Image (cartoon, helix red, strand yellow):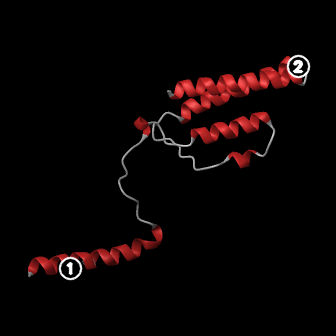
Amino acid sequence: MSDDDDQSKLLRLLVDKFVKKDKAKASSAHGTGRKLAQLAFWCDMRQVLAANEATMGLEILDDIAEIILDESVEAADALSGSVRIQPKPSRQHESQGAPDHQRFTSYLALVSEEPSLGQQEAQDFIGR
């Protein structure tokens, strides 16, 4: 089942649940409309979050969204694992290395004048 199918299924289940809940409470159409708008927002947001296949944990966010919309229990209880959101692959770039930290700049200048221990060992090994 694709991610779009999962999303459509989730949306149908949530809409059915909230429409039935609103009817049972005899609430206004405004309440149902508000819930539907919130569901539509979450579906749009979920599409953005799923832009990268490396993103993980969207089902956990679905559970949290459902609880927030349902207003039945503490939403923090639904945070059952890690969520990792990655940007669109086209927005990612290769790291050029970490920039030097200000605190260590003067130290790095001193160290760069002398070969490192690894460099010394390599030179000793080659020189043998």
Quarter occupied by residue 118: bottom left
The residue carrying mark 2 is 28
Crowd tier of the residue under label 1, counting other residues whose Cα lies within 10 Å: few below 14, some 14–19, many 20 or above: few
Residue at 90% from the left image edge and 25% from the top image edge: 25
Residue 115 image offset from top left, x and y in percent: 24, 77
Seen in the picture, residue 96 relative to 111 is either above or below; the reply is above
- The answer to whether residue 59 is left or right of residue 124 is right
Seen in the picture, residue 76 relative to 27 is either above or below; the reply is below
Residue at 57% from the left image edge and 46% from the top image edge: 83
The residue carrying mark 1 is 121
Three-letter code, disc 1: Glu
Q: Label 1's element?
A: helix
Quadrant containing the C terminus is bottom left
Toward the front, the furthest residue is 1
Report the label total.
2
Three-letter code, disc 2: Ser
Q: Nearer the viewer, residue 118 or 53?
A: 53
Residue at 36% from the left image edge and 47% from the top image edge: 94
